Amino acid sequence: MTIRTLPLITIAMPIKNRVWALPYVLKSIELQDYPKKNIKIVFVDNISTDGTYEKLKEWAQENKDYYYAITLLRAEGNIPRLRNICLENAEGEYVLFWDSDIVAPSFAIKLLLNTAESLGGDVITVNYIYADEDLVQNVLEKTTPENVRVERVLGSGTGFTLIRRKVFESIGGFNELFVVGEDTEFSWRVVERGFKILRVNIEVLHLKHRDTFIPRAGQNFKKWIIFNFKYRSKVYLVSYKTLPKALKFRVVCWLLLPIMMLFTFLQPMIGLITLLYIAPAIWLNIRSSKSIYQGLKSFASFSVPTGLAISYGLLFHILINSVRRLWNISRRFLLL
């Protein structure tokens, strides 16, 4: 460890109905090789109904003397709203967003902090293993990192991510309109302000039970597309003026893609131009995947349909709003 003085870190955890995961997650927090007196923990419970709040209350009471502070709050809202409440109660130089179904090895906090301090990173993230409880012990028993590599990336989730508080002071918190993709929107704002996002190649365990009310592509592809077309597109439209430039650019690119494909069909020689047009999106998928095959598969099966659904959904809402305005204007005119 090269850091002279270990700073105060706030672990920020939004949570709802995770009593099944709490024994593993809390044990992972307890085992962190970082002074407990340098850790504040903020739990924000989204009105759980399965005993999560009561379990957290019990754990907080038992451990309050070991940590700098443990704050347990209850609030109703979506994920970005709960994250912002965590931020409002955070202290110290860094905030570690730790999802309520994440199990991390004991060296994780120190490693992320050391990466931030030694390489000047503003946002430090990790890789994830999606699996059930069978792998928990394997993760908890890892005491030292192996073959640590760090790379600069253009985006980051917030499942297990260390962020300097000065980042939030500069760009604000999370957009509370985004019930999905709030971390993507936040990441692009981070990049556009010149902050550095680094990814350490260690893996944390994501105990993902698919019990969320928000449809996912892997669960029901049709519902996922409808959700993006009807609802996420509306959020993009309402937030368009404040969206990061990269997301605005994405919308335009996906709108133009079918036109490019049509021209390719009519004139195959244009195919090369179309390939170059979509190359950046393909590259981003490959870079965030474990192989070229997985990256191409992710691009074709997820990025393309999701991007088209959001972009054309946004266009659909614009047209509907325009028709409504014209109808209201014509009604007023006829009533004169």
Image (spheres, rainbow, N blue to C red):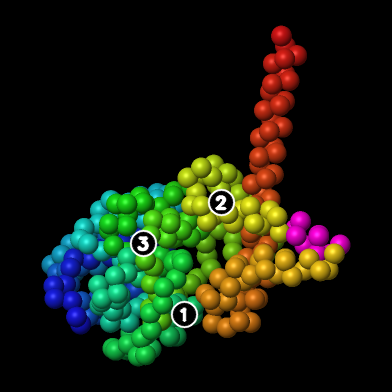
In percent of width and height, residue 70 lies at 21, 62
Q: Is residue 107 above or below residue 80?
A: below
Q: Residue furthest right?
A: 266
Q: Are marks 2 and 1 in contact (CB under 8 Å)?
A: no
The amino acid on which the numbered mark 2 sits, given as a three-letter code, is Lys
Identity of the residue drawn at 37% across and 66% down: 196
Q: Which residues are magenta?
A: 258-266
The residue that mark 3 highlights is 195
The amino acid on which the numbered mark 3 sits, given as a three-letter code, is Phe
The answer to whether 146 appears left or right of 266 in the picture is left
Callout 2 crowding tier (Cα within 10 Å): few <14, some 14–19, many ≥20: some
Identity of the residue drawn at 14% across and 69% down: 37
Q: Image quarter for residue 280?
A: bottom right
Q: Does the magenta segment cover residue 118?
A: no
Q: Residue furthest top?
A: 336
Q: Image quarter for residue 256?
A: bottom right
In percent of width and height, residue 156 lies at 44, 67
In 3D space, how far apart are the residues under numbered discs 2 and 1 (Cα atoms)?
31 Å
Q: Image quarter for residue 153?
A: bottom left
The answer to whether 298 appears left or right of 185 in the picture is right
Identity of the residue drawn at 13% across and 76% down: 4
The amino acid on which the numbered mark 1 sits, given as a three-letter code, is Ile
The residue that mark 2 highlights is 248
Q: Is residue 49 above or below residue 293?
A: above
In 3D space, how far apart are the residues under numbered discs 3 and 2 (Cα atoms)?
20 Å
Q: Secondary structure at mark 2?
A: helix
In percent of width and height, residue 114 lies at 25, 77
Which label was assigned to residue 129? 1
Q: Is residue 36 visible?
A: yes
